[in-house]
Amino acid sequence: MRLAFPMYAGLAVMIVAAACGPKAAAPPPAPTVNQDSIDAARRAEQEAAAREQARRDSIARAQQESERVRRQREADSLAALGSAGEAVRAMIARAVHFDFDQANVRAGEDAGILDEKVSILQANPGLTIEVAGHADERGSDEYNLALGNRRAIAAKQYLTTRGIDASRVSTRSMGEEQPVDPGHTEDAWARNRRGEFTVTGGGGTLRRP
């Protein structure tokens, strides 16, 4: 009996020790939410989005301004070309005049007018023109038609001898049928003895020489 008690006591101690063995580790505490960090991250995202939108807006404005400038320059260029075209047409339309019963091109102003037309034709390779010869009222209809024709041909020859292709200059005679001055004086007849020039092709966009 004396030996049995200690044995029972030791067994009880062992049972109690087993029951009170090592305890399981406690789970870590759940992380706490840092609202300040979340708010800061959101502000950073918003600021980045605002900067990107500002960059896109700046690019769009620059593109719009570039397009506006391009269109303005195009409009200015077209206006300049239109103005230049009208000036060139006026230069082409300048008539040359002839002495009484003559068909030769006069030196001085008339030759200068034809030289101007040579420059215009050279600057506008697609341009074609017509020369119409006119006479004053003196002489028969047949004679004046022939004289007007000789005057138109003389103007054409002046141009072709200076390098203008003959196919670009056509001629016709109006005789005395279309006077610019209906008077019956020397001054009126002098104005009516002329060669007139009109554009027949390639006159859409004319450039100054």
Image (spheres, rainbow, N blue to C red):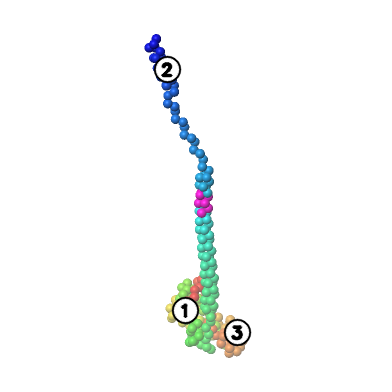
Residue 15 placement (x, y as % from top left): 42, 19
Foreground: disc 3 or disc 1: 1
What residue is at 41 percent from the left and 16 percent from the top? 9
Main SS category, magenta section? helix
Is tag 1's residue or tag 2's residue first in the polypeptide sequence?
2
Other-residue count near label 2 (Cα within 10 Å), few / some / many at <14 / 14–19 / ≥20:
few
Membership of 65 in magenta stretch: no
Whether residue 192 can be seen here: yes
Q: Looking at this rendering, what residue extends furthest in the top direction?
A: 1
Identify the disc placed on residue 98: none
Q: Check disc 1 and report the residue beneath it.
A: 118
* Distance Cα–Cα, label 3 vs label 1: 28 Å
* Distance Cα–Cα, label 1 vs label 2: 134 Å
Membership of 50 in magenta stretch: yes
Q: In which quarter of the image is residue 179?
A: bottom right
Residue type indicated by callout 2: Ala
Horizontal side, residue 10 vs residue 29: left or right: left
> Which contiguous range is marked in magenta?
44-51
Q: Check disc 2 and report the residue beneath it.
A: 12
Mark 3: secondary structure: loop
Q: Is residue 47 above or below residue 171?
A: above
Q: Nearer the viewer, residue 86 or 79?
A: 79
Mark 2: secondary structure: helix
Q: Check disc 3 and report the residue beneath it.
A: 181
Is tag 3's residue or tag 1's residue first in the polypeptide sequence?
1
Residue type indicated by callout 1: Val
Foreground: disc 1 or disc 2: 2
Q: Looking at this rendering, what residue extends furthest in the bottom direction?
A: 186
